[in-house]
Amino acid sequence: LLDAAMICQNSGDALTGMPYAETALQLARQWDDEPSAGEATTALGLLAYTAGDTERALRLLEECLTVAARMPNGKQIAW
């Protein structure tokens, strides 16, 4: 799902990609998969930015940083 979202984002069609990323985030949360939830939140933030919704993008990317800070290896913050 995230790959489909990013393909849409990279081709400039953020609005088409958002449902893919939203579904990925919903599933990650349902499965208590915090790393995947962080990745989906990042994807949504990038999609929002591409779509011109900078307020939503900032909120989502800040949420992603919060999730990344809880990860044990710190790799997610650097990414």
Image (spheres, rainbow, N blue to C red):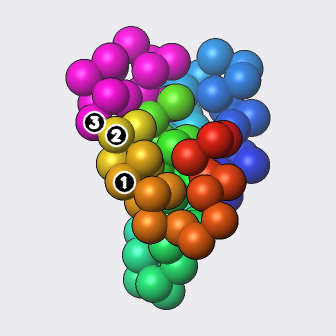
Q: Quadrant of the N terminus?
A: bottom right
Residue 1, visible in the rendered structure: yes
* Residue 52 rendering spot, x and y as whole percentages: 39, 13
* Residues tagged 3 and 2 counted as in contact (Cβ below 8 A): yes
Q: Residue at x 65, y 65 (%)?
A: 73
Q: Residue furthest bottom?
A: 31
Q: Secondary structure at mark 1?
A: helix
Q: Secondary structure at mark 2?
A: helix
Q: Measure how far apart labels 1 and 3 are at the Cα level.
A: 11 Å
Q: Residue at x 41, y 38 (%)?
A: 61
Q: Name the residue carrying label 3.
A: 59
User: Which callout, 3 or 2, points to the residue nearer the camera?
Assistant: 2
- Tell me: 52 left or right of 33: left
- Tell me: 64 left or right of 74: left
Q: Looking at the rendered structure, which numbered label has been put on residue 66? A: 1
Highlighted range, magenta = 47-59
> Residue 42 in magenta?
no
* Residues tagged 2 and 1 counted as in contact (Cβ below 8 A): yes
Residue type marked 1: Thr
Relative to 41, say whether 62 is above or below: above
Name the foreground residue: 7 vs 29.
29
* Residue 12 rendering spot, x and y as whole percentages: 64, 16
Name the foreground residue: 40 vs 66.
66
Q: Which comes before the other along the chain, label 1 or label 3?
A: 3
Residue type marked 2: Glu
> Residue 53 in magenta?
yes
Q: Residue at x 44, y 67 (%)?
A: 70
Q: Secondary structure at mark 3?
A: helix
Q: Name the residue carrying label 2.
A: 62
Where, by quadrant of the figure, is residue 5 drawn? top right
- Tell me: 12 left or right of 14: right
